[in-house]
Amino acid sequence: MTQDQAKCSTCKDRNTEQCNPEKCSEPPVLPLNEASDIKRVVAVMSGKGGVGKSSVSALLAVALARRGHQVGILDADITGPSIPKLFGVIDRPEQFNNFILPARTITGIRMMSLNLLLPQEDDPVIWRGPILSSAVKQFWTDVAWGELDYLIVDMPPGTGDVPLTVMQSLPLNGLLVVSSPQDLSMMVVKKAIKMARMINVPILGLVENMSYLPCPYCGEKIHLFGSSHVGEAAQKNNLPLLAVLPVDPELAELGDAGLIENYNGTSMQGMESLVKVLEKTLGGKIIKEREGA
Ligand SMILES: Nc1ncnc2c1ncn2[C@@H]1O[C@H](COP(=O)(O)OP(=O)(O)OP(=O)(O)O)[C@@H](O)[C@H]1O
């Protein structure tokens, strides 16, 4: 995808006589609504599905909240939303004036997900790309987020319509890219990195998830997927590898039980260092004007 193709893909004038990519500017970043004061927005992305992006988003929110930050999670994975399940949240968001109030987890993390609005949590969402994208925009424009130090955006996997909308329409301070160690996963991660760079979204760094399994008897690291390619990819793309998380059955069990906020295992240490990097990199800043926007 070239920069122009990225820019044009959501334009109403595409393929019409009015189309003139040279004169066009990128779609505008959506302003904050009057019921939200969000200081930092961090999106979590992965090249492919199932690498643990939602788990990393959830753990990051938990780690930030434990440091005393006001945190929200916007579940932009509209067709495969797993954030409410990880936190055991089933409350339907309420309406207040013209806004939707986000649901709250046990520890007070604010959350908005399409799953909270569906009649049944297992109802499928069979929508085309533009409708998915407008749902994500509404989670920004129509939700009364209140005062937040960090909003974490859990993106759908890949480089489709919704990640493009998030990158173009939300004022992202930065992007975290999650990958598992396999080379196949890295190939798609490189696409995600290229896409973010085309749209001028700063990439904060990479997170390697399910990197190894610590042997329960001797603690030796078992590399289930062979040796990792993530460190090498980080180096080649001039990006820091911010956290390396093991396979941890406790994390999967707590996530399945909706109790991810109770997690205190090894991956939490990785998240704590990641939080310190975020505080150092983004701390004190307010939402950034996108370069060239
Ligand atoms: N470090 C880990 N250790 C053990 N299990 C994990 C780990 N990370 C994720 N999992 C498990 O792997 C599964 C997929 O994780 P998750 O839903 O976070 O992935 P995802 O990349 O967000 O998936 P999707 O592509 O569907 O959005 C879940 O069952 C989760 O509990």
Image (cartoon, rainbow, N blue to C red):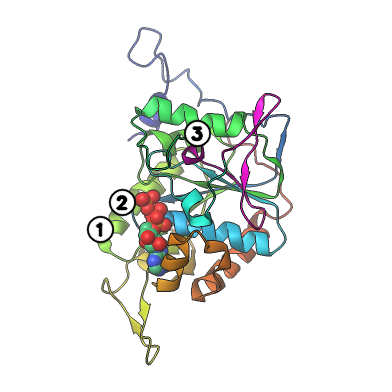
Q: Secondary structure at mark 2?
A: helix
Q: Which mark is residue 170?
A: none
Residue 96 included in the magenta stretch of the image? yes
Residue drawn where x is 34% and y is 47% of the image: 191
Mark 3 residue CB less than 8 A from any atom of ligand 1: no
Residue drawn where x is 41% and y is 8% of the image: 18
Q: What amino acid is at disc 3? A: Val
Does the residue at mark 3 contact the one at mark 1 (Cβ under 8 Å)?
no
Q: CA distance from mark 3 to mark 2?
A: 23 Å
Q: Quadrant of residue 29?
A: top right
Q: Which mark is residue 136?
A: 3
Near mark 1 (Cα within 10 A), the count class, few <14, some 14-19 or many ≥20, is few
Foreground disc of the pair 3, 2: 3
Does the residue at mark 2 contact the one at mark 1 (Cβ under 8 Å)?
yes
Q: What amino acid is at disc 1? A: Leu
Q: Position of residue 22 (x, y in %)?
A: 44, 20
Residue 169 appears left or right of 121: right
Q: Is residue 205 visible?
A: no
Choose between 108 and 283: the one closer to the eye: 108
Magenta-tinted stretch: 92-117
Q: Secondary structure at mark 1?
A: helix
Residue drawn where x is 61% and y is 53% of the image: 105
Residue 103 included in the magenta stretch of the image? yes
Mark 2 residue CB less than 8 A from any atom of ligand 1: no
Choose between 254 and 16: the one closer to the eye: 254
Q: Which mark is residue 184?
A: 1
Q: Position of residue 180 (x, y in %)?
A: 35, 63
Residue 156 appears left or right of 103: left
Foreground disc of the pair 3, 1: 3
